Amino acid sequence: MKFVPTDVAGAFLIEPEMLEDERGAFARTFCAETFAAQGLASVYSQCNVSTNARRGTLRGMHFQIAPRAEAKLVRATRGRVFDVALDLRPESPSYLKWAAVELDAVRHNAFYIPAGCAHGFLTLEDHCELFYQMSEIYAPDLARGVRWDDPAFAIAWPFAPEVIGTRDAHYPDFSNEVVL
């Protein structure tokens, strides 16, 4: 696996090293020892899947606060998405910065998003599916979000969403008091 740093401290695009032969291809997509050696979460307590019927579907920007702040390992298992990590860790050198990668089921890549970062994505084609590995169990009382289009972050989405949930569309403007 190749770990490609992004503009968010501790967030990585993960590219598998595909071994191809006459049968097809094989790649390791996760190894607890390799992740731990990189300083990344290597134990995942929960896995989730997100299906999205239409191009232009936006989900985010979601995160969970302490004591159950969660790291995420996200990959597209069908389709392509514009995937975003937003650093909400006040002590981080990349505080309030964001990084985006294109996750593509054909490339089998993944995005590692550290605990303390918000996450969201925009589907780039119809019928996208994402698979999430979460380092913590979902705790509804600790779930939070920030607005996808908040000017405090100026995330450069590739185009305006066409489908967005009510909750995601109406998160309040960013402030440390609201988030933490």
Image (cartoon, grey):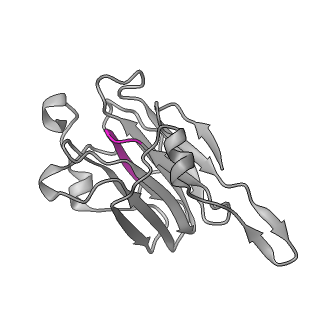
Q: Position of residue 15 (x, y in %)?
A: 65, 51
Relative to 173, residue 102 above or below: below
**Residue at figure coordinates x 46%, y 61% from the top left:** 56
For the residue pair 156 and 143, the one nearer the viewer reads as 143
Q: Nearer the viewer, residue 179 or 45?
A: 45
Left or right side of 34 for 93: left
Residue 117 located within the stretch drawn in magenta = yes
User: What span is in magenta?
Assistant: 114-120
Pick whichever, 125 or 44, lies toward us: 44
Q: Position of residue 170 (x, y in %)?
A: 20, 50
Q: What's the residue at 72%, 68% (across, down)?
A: 26
Q: How many marks?
A: 0
Indicate left or right for 78 with 174 as reference. right
Q: Where residue 63 appears, x then y in whole percent?
A: 28, 48
Vertical order, 46 against 168 (above or below): below
Toward the front, the furthest residue is: 33
Which residue: 16% across, 35% down? 180
80 or 27: nearer the viewer: 27
Left/right of residue 32 with respect to residue 136 in the rendered view: right
Residue 16: image x %, image y %?
67, 55
Question: Measuring 31% from the left and 33% from the top, which residue is drawn there?
Answer: 88
Q: Quadrant of residue 124?
A: bottom right
Q: Is residue 85 visible?
A: yes
